[in-house]
Image (cartoon, rainbow, N blue to C red):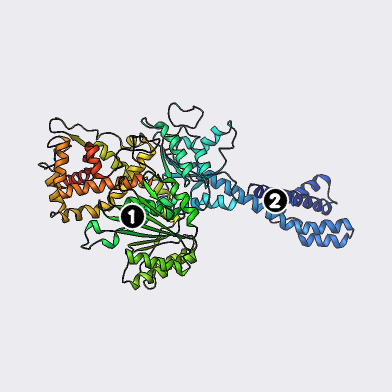
Amino acid sequence: MKNNKTNTNRLIFLLAAVSFLIATIEGAIYYESYAPFFRILLVLQNSINAFGFKATVTLKDAFAYMKDNTSVFNRSIAYAYGIAVFTAPYCTLSFIYKFLERLLQFIVFFRRNKKCRHIVVFGYNDDVRAMLKNGVSDKKKTCVHIVSAEKLSGEEVYGLNKHGYAVHCADLLKADESDIPSLVSKMFLEKAENIILFEKSSVRNFSLLQLFRLNEKDSEYRIMLSPGAKVSCRCEEEGISRLISSYYNSTAGSDAYFDLEIIGLPEMQARKMYSDCPLHTVYRDTDTPLKDWTVHLLVAGLGKLGEEAVLQAMNLGVVHEQNHIIIDVFDNSIASRKAVFLNQFSRDSFDMTDDRVVLKSDVADGVLEINFFEVNVTHIDFYDTVRERAEKEPYTYAVIALEDTDLAVNCAIQLEELFAEKGVRIPILMRLDNDRRLAEYIADDAGALTDVRLIDGRSSVITLDMITGRSIDRIAKDYNHFYNNIALITANEAGAADNSDEDPENEWNRLRLFRRSSSKAAAYHDEVKNDVIPKLAAENGAPLPEKLEELIGSNGTLMKYNGSAWQMNGSEEELLEEMKKDGFAYELASLEHRRWCCYMASVGWRAGERSDKFRRNPCLVTQQKLMETRPEMCKYDLMSLMARYRKYAQGKK
């Protein structure tokens, strides 16, 4: 693109020079009878006017002169002049366009006040275009800088400038060290609140990340970002993601100079899908006991989105300590894709065979199994297998993560018909990123695809407001802050000191990236608990507010709440014994512990002596085993209950 633009500029310059030369020669010939001084002025006047859309020597004049002077030279110049009269104004228009483009860039760049909020986006691709198309909520107080390693066309730069975006065509990874300070200053990198690394290559994003200074021990030659800046780094490769985590985690325990979030589009799509339409949707408003809320998930296509659908279901599918989670995955290249997918699991946590993976019974309570089927979704074998699997356990949710639009639509239609034959209506979520009109039609259709919903496309999931507003991790930060501030004291302790004045951002920045992911998983599951906890209380014979007051209120049987802390009614062993006697408290604690175990297993952890490096944790065991080996840990599984009680108590004031 850079060469094309350079060649175009050279061509226009050459065309202008040739046009000026021809106009000059024609003027010299036409005004040959004038005195030398006036002849020079008239020639210059004609040449300049030719670029101003009104040549002094008109085509009519040139033709008349050619008729009177018929030499080959005069005729050649006359014909060339006839062309130059049109090419010269074209060159003028090109110059005016480029001048206005540069002027617009100048205005966009300097029209912001000094208190402007700067956002710097590295990369210019289809996903960035979609992100920019969605815009930012407060354009007047926000300046968005686009940094492209490749030169953009004049039309693209003009379009971006017109919408208020400043464009910088530079590659910081290849720039000379002497040029970097100037480039950084132009991009307002050192003042930016948000830096979004959104190149298509995860490796390039990691390399760009390493340009920024991590902490006070880092090289002083790296770029120092503003305090509280957030870097959002796009990465969808497991290996590079672990490298980024290892790099950033070197600051764990101390304040990092910037907040880092690793973004994966498929992960966000799956997250949004399960938030809008939970896995347990079919059981809402039914009398089915929680332990019988079997999640039987069908996933067609084991690409990146299919993988995320499976992984998040292992966390969000837990609604009871014993409910079953069964995931059937179909793909015509299942062997190779399964091998890569399972590489993130530990054999110490899962029993693995050629076509089945089961979470070991000593790792967590309940049942979690993933079945793999190598079959083409267009073949009758696929639907025969689906019918056979549905006979054993009815499906409750289906995700069509196929990249091919034709296959996805055909699969959705046939699955809806198949389930309708059985008298079953379940959510069918379909990926449809590529065809907006078809997506709109299906979304509005109330006939053939009644039960089919669309997974939000990448363009609607990724927005500047979502990233810069930190909505993706805001819940997790509040969740982590709340858990840090819950004060638990024994019956013999006095006081209720907590650290509620601590800044949630500082707390978050001290965490390793894995701890952040764990907090996000717990926070996301809170949406599931919004349905589960009230039902669990009802199954144990009491409305939730009454149950909260009974267990952990001001005169609670387990703990007493004094407004800032919970005081246990006895020792930790006595608290555990009391918790076992209450069905609601025990089932909730068991539910949360099982969810934590399933999540840990889904990201490759196993039981053993605690080690973040080797992904081992001694608590990765069943609830019964945990109570025997680490009884002091059981009380923390009630924290989601405490969070709800605090909101309930504040609401009564």
What label sits on residue 195 in the rendered view?
none
Left or right of residue 634: residue 76: right
Amino acid of disc 1: Ser
Across and down, in percent, residue 269 comes to 41, 54
Q: Is residue 293 above or below residue 602?
A: below
Category of crowding for the residue at label 2, using alpha-carbon neighbours closer than 10 angstroms: few (below 14), some (14–19), many (at least 20): some
Q: Is residue 130 above or below residue 174?
A: below
Across and down, in percent, residue 490 comes to 15, 33
Across and down, in percent, residue 102 comes to 58, 46
Amino acid of disc 2: Ile
Residue to which mark 1 is pinned: 275
Q: Is residue 80 above or below residue 488?
A: below
Left or right of residue 453: residue 1: right
- Quadrant for residue 67, please give it: bottom right
Q: Nearer the viewer, residue 606 or 71?
A: 606
Total tally of numbered discs in the picture: 2
Left or right of residue 537: residue 86: right
Q: Nearer the viewer, residue 347 or 116?
A: 347
Q: Is residue 537 visible?
A: yes
Q: Are marks 2 and 1 in contact (CB under 8 Å)?
A: no
Q: Nearer the viewer, residue 459 or 33?
A: 459
Label 1 residue SS: helix
Quadrant where the image shows the C terminus: top left
Q: Nearer the viewer, residue 272 or 322?
A: 322
What label sits on residue 12 in the rendered view?
2
